[in-house]
Amino acid sequence: MGPNWTGHHPRAAWRGLLNDGKVGEHMQTKVNDVVSLERRGNVAVISIDNPPVNALSHPVREGLLASLRYAIADEDARAIVLVCAGRTFVAGADISEFDKPPQPPSLHESLDAIEVSTRPVVAAIHGTALGGGLELALACHYRVAVGSARFGLPEVNLGIIPGAGGTQRLPRLVGVNTALHMIATGAMIGATEALQSGLIDQIVEGDLTEGGVAFARQVSAEPRQHPRVRDRDEKLAEARAEPHLFDDFRASIARKSRGFLAPGVAVTAVEAAVNLPFDAGIARERQLIAELLQSEQSKAQRYFFFAERKSAKIPGLAADTPVVNVSRAAVIGAGTMGGGISMVLANAGIPVTLVEQNAENLERGLGVMRKNWEATAARGGSSQGQVEERLARITPTLNFEDIADADLVIEAVYEQLKLKKDVFAQVDRYAKQGALLATNTSGLDVNQIALATARPERVVGMHFFSPANVMKLLEVVRGDRSSDTAIASAMNMGKKMGKVPVLVGVCEGFVGNRMLAARGKQADRLLLEGALPHQVDRVMFDFGLPMGPYAMADLAAGIELRWRRRQETGEMDFIGDRLAELGRFGQKVGKGYYRYEPNSRAPLPDPEVEEIIREASRREGLQRRDISDQEILERLVYPMINEGARILEDGVAIRPGDIDVIWVYGYGWPTYRGGPMFYADSVGLAQIRDRLVALQAQHGDFFRPAALLERMAREGRRFQDWEQTRSAATVGS
Ligand code: 3HC
Ligand code: NAI
């Protein structure tokens, strides 16, 4: 189909193009709905306008190719500038088209048209030139950008590699090391680095299009061959002289990319750039991306891309819901969590009043914060000046009255309901009207805490994960009385603090820890039946999680926390109680479910623990047996999925994708498995239901399939097709 010439001056445009083959001067002519063309003097300007991020959807590709042809055919156009409207240059291929049959023209056709053009084509870049967008720019003869522009090939985050020449062109321009870093890890670089590495030719001050046009005019006036990236070889030659480069790079990313297919394939593709002629390299890249596109991993990662974005949307919450504008915050409690939360606020530029009950804990908390910031500076993540600047944003105090000027108060005192209610009564007394009041409780009833104030509509849970300055997840807990403004404000603040906020309802453990508890129960049961901590943990590690339940308990003082809770509830747990009585409180004391060598975090199996476990089995009258890895996997993960289904039934989460986002960002669930609910789809809900039924027959009602899971399995449905949503007014109620 040819270009559809509609727009502001359709007839003039038609005539202009058809009669004398010239592009309209100083008159934007729409080539189609998303691409337009104009001429500024002797330079043709192609402009893409496909909000929100100018993704290379089918109409964009069509309009781009058509306008390139028109511009190239216009003999008065000595050069061509490619710009984008809106907030960014092209941010990549349109990911939502990946599962649909490809519609011509392909991006390759436009890139070829650019490359063979004898008139120079200049990409003028602002925002983020990502994926296919950067590849488009790489096919141009020149690239100019504003100082705030950023550049990247993040395809690896979608489980694929660049598929429009990026793996072949980028190393030719910026060198193999930088290219490997960008392509295999998805890292972006800024304009200054892009200029230094040769990715762009100029940083433009002032108006970008004007700057691009001026640059184009200048290069087109010079009697020279315009450079094509494909012809460059000097930086590849440098890499050929370094035989260990690729092996060294593979080793350097091994830990972070464990389990992921795409990073290794990305390295292979860049190797092809070094070892093969350009066209053969392009063919290799195409073959490699085609394989990855079909992989379960890429499907999971693409699903997750959209799940994460959806989780920010709360049905029923009006877009114009007013939010609290936070110019100052207060944090109550300077312990593990309060300290971390204060750091995050200060990192986001928000001054914090940090309230403690005693001077000693306050001092200690501030010391930990300084140490953490200094460690970041030592790693090169910030400057010493920034450490001081951030510390200066913290105002320590022992007086509650000092919270009076805070727009947001986050409570992070000990996990005791009575204490939290006392603290909230105080907060209510001193906090200004209109402030957002949040508790970081990991399990107490947010509704009861809210009722300790005279303004429960202002109270929400903001459940950060430990270490709060590192973990990205934030569960925003909606209480029965929380207002829309409170929810919108907490979500908004979460984002400002660099977190991924997900709205959940009130229940024991909220979403993440509630599912974790289901897994934990089975893990403990498996120990009694015959497994050992390191076997259980290895199965979870091999599945892709950063660690299993026992390594996690040792890291996060789990033995101690649970022991203290049992002392309150009167429950018994032979293994946990024995470990606690022996002072095996985890990594911080060098022993827990494992033992640890001094200064090492490596968990080592400990015969003392194994003896306790055997003793526990004897007491239960259980004959220990060999348990297969597959059984361990199913007994740990299927109950989580089942609990996830109950969470959806109860309306504690809005949608399955939100649960997946919680598990990826809160617990390190590997994105190449999408999340527990997506994983359930890939196993098949009927299969999971059947296995749960079998386990129920063997081990009891703990495994009884949730009604929702049962129904969806029967109807052949998948969690990822979930349409039913709950509004902000109903989640958690
Ligand atoms: N395709 C389709 N939709 C996209 C998209 C893409 N490449 N990139 C962003 N979107 C959509 C989002 O889904 C979101 O939609 P919504 O408003 O309906 O939720 C909207 O654009 C805005 O996105 P964000 O909320 O992420 O906006 P931000 O301003 O926070 O971030 C961004 C902008 C940095 C561009 C970020 O969206 C991003 O990283 N996008 C993905 C970039 C990417 O992965 N590009 C490579 C694609 S694969 C490719 O190009 C293959 C090629 O090699 C052939
Ligand atoms: P912590 O024991 O490290 O710190 C609590 C701090 O609160 C102490 O410094 C204490 O002096 C202070 N405090 C107690 N009463 C106070 C009062 N009346 N006024 C001012 N300060 C007071 O505890 P941690 O681990 O930071 O936990 C805090 C909260 O965060 C708890 O509700 C916990 O459940 C929750 N949480 C903890 C996570 C973790 O992994 N540690 C994860 C997520 C939430």
Image (cartoon, rainbow, N blue to C red):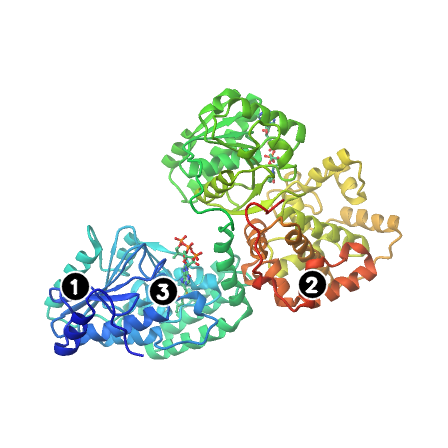
Above or below: residue 267 compared with residue 191: below
Secondary structure beneath disc 3?
helix
Looking at the rendered structure, the kind of residue marked 2 is Arg
Above or below: residue 371 compared with residue 182: above
Q: CA distance from mark 3 to mark 1?
A: 42 Å
Q: What residue is shown with label 3?
A: 176
Front residue of 607 and 322: 322
Which residue lies at the image location 47% right of the left edge and 61% below the top edge? Answer: 157
Q: Residues within 10 Å of mark 1 (few under 14, many from 20)?
A: some
Check contact, mark 2 vs mark 1: CB within 8 A: no
Task: Using the image, tell me which numbered label, if any, was put on residue 680.
Answer: none
Quarter where residue 275 is shown: bottom left
Q: What residue is shown with label 2?
A: 711
Looking at the rendered structure, the kind of residue marked 1 is Met
Q: CA distance from mark 2 to mark 1?
A: 59 Å
Q: Give left or right: position of 414 versus 19.
A: right
Q: Quadrant of the N terminus?
A: bottom left
Looking at the rendered structure, the kind of residue marked 3 is Val
Q: What residue is shown with label 1?
A: 27
Ranked by sequence position, the earlier of labels 2 and 3 is: 3
Secondary structure beneath disc 2?
helix
Q: How many marks?
A: 3
Q: Give left or right: position of 691 versus 661.
A: right
Q: Quadrant of the C terminus?
A: top right
